[in-house]
Image (spheres, helix red, strand yellow):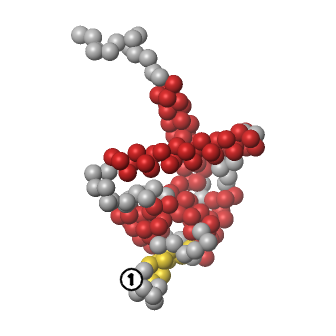
């Protein structure tokens, strides 16, 4: 019995084809970076947390880290706990307000951050692009990120839930 849409009649539109190319490129780059980071015993998300903490002009809370890295707050809390057990970060409780927690990179976290920067073949993958192509790609990535955030907000069952943003 044939499917309702046979393979020879199925056509993908331009957006679907581009989505497939984007998905494959992202998957391969992410996998290559994970393999590269495994050499210095850190995961991709741990590296991203360290980058966010190092680049932020202000101390970050777990909630702000979750929004920045598009993670659920409970997932970020678990990650922060694991990274704290590994000695990469510490949670500091501010005096004002008392219940505010800030995440801070430790000396060991700084060392791991510098080591992961030394294995950077994948992060330099965009060097195959010209300066103009990198700027265009950056603009396109920003547009796609903003549109995806918009779509996620529309699809969330609770319109007041901003757990991902």
Judge from the rendering whether residue 5 lies leftward or rightward of residue 165; answer left or right: left
- The residue lying toward the viewer, choosing from 94 and 48, is 94
**Quarter of the image containing the N terminus?**
top left
Whether residue 46 is visible = no
Whether residue 146 is visible = yes
Q: Position of residue 78 (x, y in %)?
A: 38, 66
Q: State the residue lying farthest toward the bottom.
A: 95
Judge from the rendering whether residue 122 lies leftward or rightward of residue 105; answer left or right: right
* Residue pointed to by mark 1: 99
- The residue lying toward the viewer, choosing from 4 and 153, is 153
Q: Which residue is drawn at the image coordinates 28% and 15% (left, top)?
A: 3
Judge from the rendering whether residue 18 lies leftward or rightward of residue 101; answer left or right: right
Q: Position of residue 146 (x, y in %)?
A: 50, 49
- The residue lying toward the viewer, choosing from 124 and 43, is 124
Judge from the rendering whether residue 78 lies leftward or rightward of residue 112; answer left or right: left
The secondary structure type at the circle numbered 1 is: loop
Q: Position of residue 101 (x, y in %)?
A: 44, 78
- The residue lying toward the viewer, choosing from 31 and 162, is 162
Q: Which residue is drawn at the image coordinates 54% and 49% (left, top)?
A: 34
Judge whether 124 appears above or below 55 on screen: above
Judge whether 64 appears above or below 30 on screen: below
Q: Which residue is drawn at the image coordinates 60% and 59% (left, top)?
A: 40
Q: Position of residue 158 (x, y in %)?
A: 28, 55
């Amino acid at each position: 019995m044939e499917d309702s849409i046979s393979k020879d009649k199925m056509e993908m539109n331009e957006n679907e084809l581009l989505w497939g190319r984007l998905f494959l490129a992202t998957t391969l780059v992410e996998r290559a970076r994970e393999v590269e980071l495994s050499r210095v015993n850190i995961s991709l998300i741990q590296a991203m947390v360290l980058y966010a903490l190092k680049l932020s002009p202000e101390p970050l809370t777990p909630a702000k880290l979750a929004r920045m890295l598009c993670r659920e707050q409970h997932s970020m809390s678990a990650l922060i706990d694991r990274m704290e057990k590994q000695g990469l970060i510490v949670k500091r409780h501010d005096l004002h307000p008392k219940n505010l927690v800030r995440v801070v990179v430790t000396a060991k976290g700084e060392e791991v951050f510098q080591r992961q920067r030394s294995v950077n073949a994948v992060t330099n993958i965009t060097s195959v692009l010209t300066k103009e192509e990198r700027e265009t790609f950056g603009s396109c990535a920003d547009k796609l990120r903003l549109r995806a955030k918009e779509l996620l907000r529309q699809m969330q069952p609770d319109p007041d839930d901003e757990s991902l943003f």
